[in-house]
């Protein structure tokens, strides 16, 4: 995104997770959907060349559906209006996240504030129809532990397209992703491992220097191993989709 101090951008965000897990021989399906409106206010560029901005939700709704419950949360844990500060490299890679307003501890577990908002672009200049391979690694807080994801994907500029009134470079990407992490759940240790495929498309307004639309899908096969008073391994199949689109 452009680093013009005081410039504001507003995006819609949509995330969904379809999960199928097997516990003690019984399959359980869980679907989570979140829709929100996000405002970003640029604070400019720091000495290291990173873009720093404030970010907050103007609206957020989450729906959780499973075999045992069907619940909708509006403004979960009072997140709407709470500000955080993020610093990103020019290609969108996150450097740091800090809280401006204090967030509920449970909310931090369910919706980590250190999660990247923007998809990364390669740091090298992209040329049309020439694939560029990019590796990336991110670490998130998770229920008293850490979750690390590693990805390797190829990015290709496939053309140009007008989106939201802007002339955009269209960048497609696809590749592999691996995750591993640990957490604490009710006094039990939880270890998560898995791998899968990632694909998506980015629409980037080159002249203005900001993201207009991004779409991403990740298909994962994972296992969650719990140890403590009870020991069990839970196989999990999961599809995650996320979309970000510029409003203004």
Image (cartoon, helix red, strand yellow):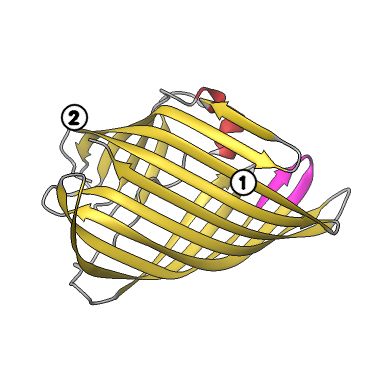
Residue at 16% in and 45% down = 165
Residue range in magenta is 182-189
State how many labels appear.
Answer: 2
Residue at 17% in and 49% down = 209
Image disc number at residue 6: 2
Label whose residue precedes the other's in the sequence (2 or 1) = 2
- Residue 112 appears in the figure: no
> Which residue is label 1 attached to?
31
Residue 165 vs 248, above or below: the answer is below
- Front in this rendered view, residue 80 or 85: 80
Q: Magenta segment: does it hold 186?
A: yes
Front: mark 2 or 1: 1
Tell me: 210 left or right of 113.
left
- Residue 154 appears in the figure: yes
Q: Magenta segment: does it hold 200?
A: no
Residue 125 location, x and y as percent?
19, 67
């Amino acid at each position: 995104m452009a680093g013009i101090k005081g410039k504001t951008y507003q995006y819609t965000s949509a995330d969904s997770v379809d999960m199928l897990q097997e516990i003690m021989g019984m399959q359980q399906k869980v679907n989570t959907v979140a829709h929100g409106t996000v405002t970003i206010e640029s604070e400019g560029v720091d000495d290291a060349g990173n873009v720093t901005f404030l970010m907050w939700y103007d609206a957020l709704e989450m729906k959780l559906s499973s075999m045992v419950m069907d619940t909708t949360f509006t403004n979960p844990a009072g997140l709407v209006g709470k500000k955080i500060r993020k610093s990103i490299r020019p290609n969108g890679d996150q450097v740091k996240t800090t809280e401006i307003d204090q967030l509920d501890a449970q909310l931090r577990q369910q919706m980590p504030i250190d999660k990247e908002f923007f998809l990364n672009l390669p740091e090298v200049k992209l040329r049309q129809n020439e694939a560029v391979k990019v590796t990336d690694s991110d670490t998130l807080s998770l229920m008293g532990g850490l979750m690390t994801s590693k990805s390797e994907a190829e990015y290709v500029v496939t053309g140009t397209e007008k989106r939201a009134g802007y002339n955009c470079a269209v960048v497609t990407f696809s590749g592999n992703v691996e995750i591993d992490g640990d957490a604490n759940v009710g006094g039990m240790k939880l270890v998560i491992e898995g791998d899968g495929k990632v694909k998506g498309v980015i629409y980037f307004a080159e002249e203005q220097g900001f993201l207009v639309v991004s779409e991403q899908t990740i298909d994962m096969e994972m296992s969650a191993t719990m140890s403590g008073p009870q020991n069990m391994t839970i196989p999990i199949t999961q599809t995650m989709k996320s979309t970000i689109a510029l409003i203004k």
